[in-house]
Amino acid sequence: MKIALVDSGIGLLAAAAALRRLRPDADLVLSSDPDGMPWGPRTPDDLSEHALACARAAAALAPDALVIACNTATVHALDAVRAELEPALPVIGTVPAIKPASAGGGRVAIWATPATTGSPYQRGLIREFGGSAEITEVACPGLADAVERADATATAAAVADAAARTPAGTEVLVLGCTHYELVVEQIRAAVSERGSAPVFLGSADAVAAQALRRIAPGTPEGSGTLTVLHTGRAAALPAAALSYPEGRLLAGLVRAR
């Protein structure tokens, strides 16, 4: 079994680690775009082209499923990637956990990149699934980039800024960017200082489970290898990835040859 994940950078670590925990035998392909990141400031068409290039590079290695492990790329590129690769290759997007977050009503905050916050895609999810919940969208400028660099000072500043704009008494906090799941404990500490103790909902576990469901029955087991592609080139895990538990977990995989 081989599963590929696509993101601009190391945000894909969260879903990859979830897959590793569920299926230690799975072969993983991590296809990112350090030459073209960040994707957020790009136009939707340009972003789609970069995401497609990463997806094509991963698809060339014949995975059994491909995950777009990036909320922003899912917003702008999922349809294009599916149009090119499906039905031969199942493609799974990453959707903010707005539906489960809103199921009980109450106060919900959605932390996301500026490119995703306020987008028609996210607003559509809120209209469809928000129900009676009181939802606040919280843009987090600079946070994904700081996490990508493993810049502790910049990460702390961006988290503090977003926490200051998160309403007190928030009951559920949706992590609407895969990078944020790598620093969830820092986010938890920051919002708790402001009087909130929300439940945190990311997407990594749900995306991993969905990827496994989409793989055809009878697919042979893998051998737990790791392949890393940087803008289509064979590479190793970046040093910043090893700053996070998810990256260190994946570093234990055998590097594919």
Image (cartoon, rainbow, N blue to C red):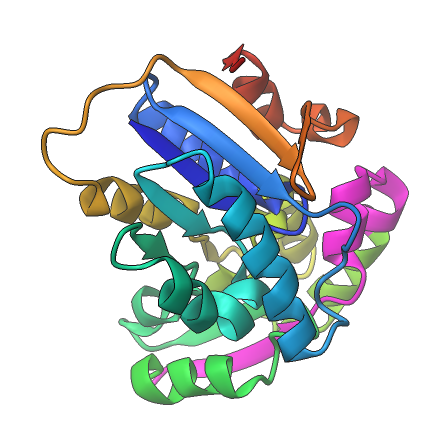
Whether 96 is among the magenta residues is no
Taking the spot 67% from the left edge, 25% from the top edge, the residue there is 237
Can residue 95 be seen here? The reply is: yes
**235 relative position to 214: left or right:** right
As rendered, which of 240 and 37 lies closer to the eye? 37
**140 relative position to 70: left or right:** right
Quick check: 96 above or below 90? below
Residue 161, quarter of the rendered image: bottom right
Residue 168, quarter of the rendered image: bottom right
Per the rendered image, the range of residues in magenta is: 132-156
> What is the quadrant of the N terminus in the image?
top left
Count of numbered tags: 0
Point out residue 137 in the picture as x, y percentages from the top left corner. Answer: 58, 78
> What is the quadrant of the C terminus in the image?
top right
Considering every residue shown, the one lying at the far left of the view is 217
Taking the spot 77% from the left edge, 71% from the top edge, the residue there is 41
Quick check: 192 above or below 251? below
Quick check: 149 above or below 253? below
Quick check: 217 above or below 101? above
Taking the spot 39% from the left edge, 46% from the top edge, the residue there is 66
Point out residue 153 in the picture as x, y percentages from the top left corner. Answer: 89, 43
Point out residue 85 in the picture as x, y percentages from the top left corner. Answer: 37, 57
